[in-house]
Image (cartoon, helix red, strand yellow):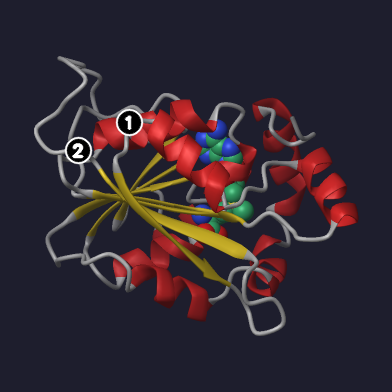
Amino acid sequence: MGLLEDKARARLFYKYLSKVYDRVNPFVWNEEMRAQALDLIDLDGDDRVLDVGCGTGFATEGLLGETEHVYGLDQSPHQLEKAYAKFGKRGAVQFALGDAERLPYRDGAFDAVWSSGSIEYWPDPVAALEECRRVVEPGGPVLIVGPNYPRSTALQKLADAIMLFYDEEEADRMFRAAGFEEFEHHLMGPSYSPEIAITTVAYAPEGETDGDDERAETTA
Ligand SMILES: C[S@@+](CC[C@H](N)C(=O)[O-])C[C@H]1O[C@@H](n2cnc3c(N)ncnc32)[C@H](O)[C@@H]1O
């Protein structure tokens, strides 16, 4: 397991990275990639969408261009402070401080779930993907952007030491283990590295819920 696949360490990391996140982020995850990912799911203006690991709100902003019912959750108070500065703490976006592995929402609460650039920090990605499946309505899309596994052996060693990087085969395994049967992967990236990111769109199986989980929605 990589150094940053630890919630406390990732929180500490983002305490500092949050200060420059919006300036460094475009090198690996930019507006063109965000638009490409948004095109993969068909959002309606009244859809309720959850952004898991919303960070400073880069993807949240893109989602707000599609629907006004956007929820953002992140485990880093420092990242959320940056998001509040853009959107207001209790403005257009319903924010929550929380953990991807234990989402504070009821079953089927959302029409779509989105998460970009966060899965690589989740110590138990399958558990968090199960949570994404639980909170999206049956048949709804769960879109996850993560880092593609590098091809060179040297880079693979470095990547493995830091966080989760994964290829399509590993993505198949994780999404199946999380209970998804229907999903597709798309490689994308900036012009200098067009396959840097792996974006999966998975659909929650129809007609299924995980029981009568009554956890209420919360805000940060
Ligand atoms: C690379 S940033 C991505 C931010 C944003 N989604 C974007 O598209 O720019 C990763 C975010 O995931 C959050 N994160 C990491 N582990 C998390 C967890 N277990 N639960 C919730 N958020 C988490 C971090 O705090 C950080 O804000």
Tell me which residue sits at (53%, 33%) in the image: 125
- What's the amino acid at mark 2? Pro
Tell me which residue sits at (86%, 53%) in the image: 153
Picture layout, residue 220 above or below residue 127? below
Indicate the quadrant where residue 160 lies.
top right
Q: Position of residue 114 (x, y in %)?
A: 37, 52
| Local SS, label 2 | loop
For the view shown, which residue lies furthest in the front direction?
169
Picture layout, residue 142 above or below residue 148? above
Picture layout, residue 59 above or below residue 188? above
- What's the amino acid at mark 1? Gly
For the view shown, which residue lies furthest in the left direction?
207
Question: Horizontally, is 169 left or right of 36 in the view?
Answer: right
Question: Horizontally, is 46 left or right of 186 in the view?
Answer: left
For the view shown, which residue lies furthest in the right direction?
154
Residue 179, numbered label: 1
Of 186 and 192, the residue lying toward us: 186
Of 38 and 99, the residue lying toward us: 38
**Is any atom of residue 85 visible in this view?**
no
Q: CA distance from mark 2 to mark 1?
A: 8 Å
Tell me which residue sits at (23%, 23%) in the image: 216
Q: Position of residue 67 (x, y in %)?
A: 22, 65
| Local SS, label 1 | loop
Residue 205, numbered label: 2
Q: Position of residue 121 (x, y in %)?
A: 63, 39
Question: Horizontally, is 215 left or right of 56 in the view?
Answer: left
Indicate the quadrant where residue 136 lies.
top left
Of 98 and 150, the residue lying toward us: 150
Tell me which residue sits at (63%, 57%) in the image: 148
Question: Horizontally, is 25 left or right of 140 in the view?
Answer: right
